[in-house]
Image (tube, helix red, strand yellow):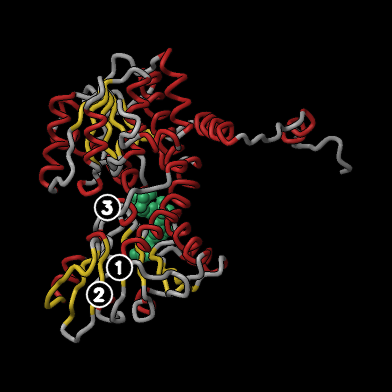
Amino acid sequence: MSETDALTWARANTPVLQSLATEHATDTPFAGLTVAVATHLEAKSGVLIETLAAAGAAVAFTPSEPQSTHGDVVDTLDAQDAITAYAWEGMTDEEFADAQHTLLETAEPDIILDDGCELIAKVHAAHPEVAETVLGGGEQTTAGITRLEAMDAEGVLAFPCFTVNDTPMKHYFDNVHGTGESALANIAISTNTVLSGTRVVIAGYGYCGRGVARKARGVGAQTIVTEVDPRKALQAHMDGHRVLSMAQAAPIGELFITTTGTREVLRAEHIEQMQDGAQLANAGHFDVEIDLAGIEAMATETSEPTPGVRSYHLSDGRRIHLLAEGRLVNLTGPYSSGHPAEVIDTTHAMMFAAGREVATRHAELSPGVYAIPDRVDRQIAERKLRTLGVEIDEPTAAQDAYRDDWQHAESSF
Ligand code: NAI
């Protein structure tokens, strides 16, 4: 393989995955198993796919979002033994759905590693005979876990699924730092406008929103947060952000970023109040957070002043700019390449570990939603620290005894 293929840089910046590939090239925990991976198909997820193959898996992959696919990555992967692509760059929404169905019909996966629960939902809805043979799965993102929990609550989930997003090693780093940095970087590159001094409205103060808000303030933006959860709103207030309802924020904001995981957070009634030149971007998983039909209906015409930005011309002369078609701004814009490699390295290591748990423990798991065991989360953290050359302390024997002794026998009472 060429030393300059699309994955070379990503491999060099994903030391945790590289260490897993080296370690599991000998014990091959996935030997004899087909792993289906639905993910954003850019170079870093390519490294996850290669790591699974190095650990013995046959890997079949599709996008988790049709617009985030990098064709050169798909070609590099597809050319490798044991890896099959059900993907190409520039897929329509229909082709994306068809490719996922084709994968499920032809590859017949033993394990599904998903991002947004599209593949897992489809195997249950349209291919129940395949779902019956799946040993288990893993889900990477908040939005996908919400769907998995709904499936579990309805009693339709046919196999065990690990909730990778809910681990500290995922959401403290990927959602906070990965989304925070990559969303802002891609907005800045797409618009070539300044963040410093700009009034940035962040909808949602969960892990992603917190990261976006903290980093936006770090470069000098005036941050405003909207929320529906009073505790999150209070957290944002105590973290020093201005908290407003969206109705209050709409006429003030200059850049709006949604990170809620729900639909129509920015609606026509808000757009009606916005300033000329307001920019709208979504960093939540699906393209439903901004009411696209609503803004479309308000516009007299649209234009594309620069790649990745669609301007809606309103009848009173205002222009509202939508980035990346309202899809994930850090992954689907013309310049977007997703999270920083070192951040997604640990997320993908957790996805690998979820698959490995299924491969090695499926016999003891019944259908349902499972947390990744804490020992696995710790192991990935330890592995990451080793790659950084960072050492930490061990609790002393006295500290262990103190933790376990509820009477605190040596204290004075
Ligand atoms: P989270 O559950 O921690 O945070 C979501 C927050 O949005 C919550 O605090 C909730 O109260 C708030 N919220 C819900 N409805 C709202 C509304 N109408 N107005 C204002 N706030 C509202 O979830 P997390 O981890 O922050 O993820 C958020 C979304 O981002 C999900 O869709 C997730 O899948 C996606 N995601 C995107 C990534 C990316 O690369 N862009 C990476 C990781 C997650």
Specify which label sits upstream in the sequence, 1 or 3. Answer: 1
Quarter where residue 114 is shown: top left
> Distance of mark 3 from mark 2, alpha carbons?
19 Å
Dot 3, how many residues are within 10 Å of its Cα: few (below 14), some (14-19), or many (20+)? many
| Residue 405 in the image: above or below residue 299 | above
Q: Which mark is residue 280?
A: 1
Q: What amino acid is found at the position of numbered circle 2 in the picture? A: Ile
Residue 411, how many percent across, how many down? Answer: 86, 40
Query: Looking at the picture, which amino acid does disc 1 mark?
Result: Leu
Tell me: residue 201, above or below residue 130: below
Residue positioned 28% across, 61% down in the render: 289
Q: Secondary structure at mark 2?
A: strand
Q: Are marks 2 and 1 in contact (CB under 8 Å)?
A: yes
What residue would you read off at disc 3? 332
Q: How many marks?
A: 3
Q: Position of residue 294 (x, y in %)?
A: 18, 70
Sequence-first disc among 3 and 2: 2
Eye-nearest disc, 1 or 3: 3
Is 256 left, or right, of 178 in this rendering? left
> Which quadrant, please, contains the C terminus?
top right
- Residue type (three-letter) at the residue carrying disc 3: Thr
